[in-house]
Amino acid sequence: NYVISKCQSVSDLLEVGILLKEAGLLRGDALAVNIVPLFETIDDLDRSAAIMRGAFALPRYRRWLEGRHGWQEVMLGYSDSNKDGGYLTANWALYRAELALVDAFREHGVRLRLFHGRGGTVGRGGGPSFEAILAQPAGSVTGGLRITDEVALDCAQEAAGQLRFEIEAAFSQGLPNTPMANATVRVVSGNFL
């Protein structure tokens, strides 16, 4: 996934397409990675559905989506929206954005997967994940749901450390010249690298 932080326009989405083409990750209309807009501020959340409608109206962008089986992932930023508008305003803007995105995606026949970028503390959009999932608007989880929160990330990082130890032990068996010599395992956005 290529996440576009502070996505504010259709142009932001298209610029990533150009970057992917230059990097060899776009061949014809086949994207090698998903383009994921991250709507973070209150204004960006308010415009998110209009931005996606604008992208869906472009034949090239539609072909990119067709190459990704009609899926579009959208990330919603809890931390910055909380900093921008305060807890209550941010949560109301997030809720309204989800409803508007569900409608926009339904209108254009695109499959929506929402990615909730939540912090660990309430001020960063954190709190009980179970309650957050239950509070999602109707229709917003039909395409799946991704949530990143600090607690889960901390657990994954601990697991990565343990995994690295176990992998190194399995491969090295005390030999200095092994495939895992000087290797590092780290977690980036919940993915092991």
Image (cartoon, rainbow, N blue to C red):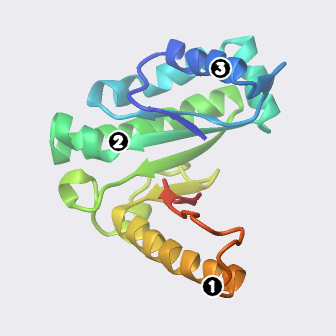
Label 1 environment density (alpha carbons within 10 Å; few <14, some 14–19, many ≥20): few
Residue type at the position of mark 1: Ala
Q: Nearer the viewer, residue 166 or 26?
A: 166
Query: CB of mark 1 within 8 Å of CB of mark 2?
Result: no
Spatial CA distance of label 1 from label 2 is 46 Å
Q: Quadrant of residue 148?
A: bottom left
Label 3 environment density (alpha carbons within 10 Å; few <14, some 14–19, many ≥20): many
Spatial CA distance of label 3 from label 1 is 42 Å
Q: Point out the tag, 3 or 1, that comes first from the N-terminus.
A: 3
Q: Position of residue 21 (x, y in %)?
A: 71, 19
Query: CB of mark 3 within 8 Å of CB of mark 1?
Result: no
Label 2 environment density (alpha carbons within 10 Å; few <14, some 14–19, many ≥20): many
Q: Nearer the viewer, residue 139 or 21?
A: 21
- Would you name the residue on which mark 1 appears? 169
- Under tag 3, what secondary structure? helix
Rendered-image quadrant of the N terminus: top right
Q: Which mark is residue 183?
A: none
Q: Nearer the viewer, mark 1 or mark 2?
A: 1
Q: Point out the tag, 1 or 2, that comes first from the N-terminus.
A: 2
For image coordinates 36% across by 31% down, the residue present is: 45
Q: Position of residue 128 (x, y in %)?
A: 32, 69
- Under tag 1, what secondary structure? helix
Residue type at the position of mark 3: Gly
**Residue 142 versus residue 47 in the image, above or below:** below
Q: Which mark is residue 17?
A: 3
For image coordinates 42% across by 32% down, the residue present is: 5
- Would you name the residue on which mark 2 appears? 94
Q: Quadrant of residue 118?
A: bottom left
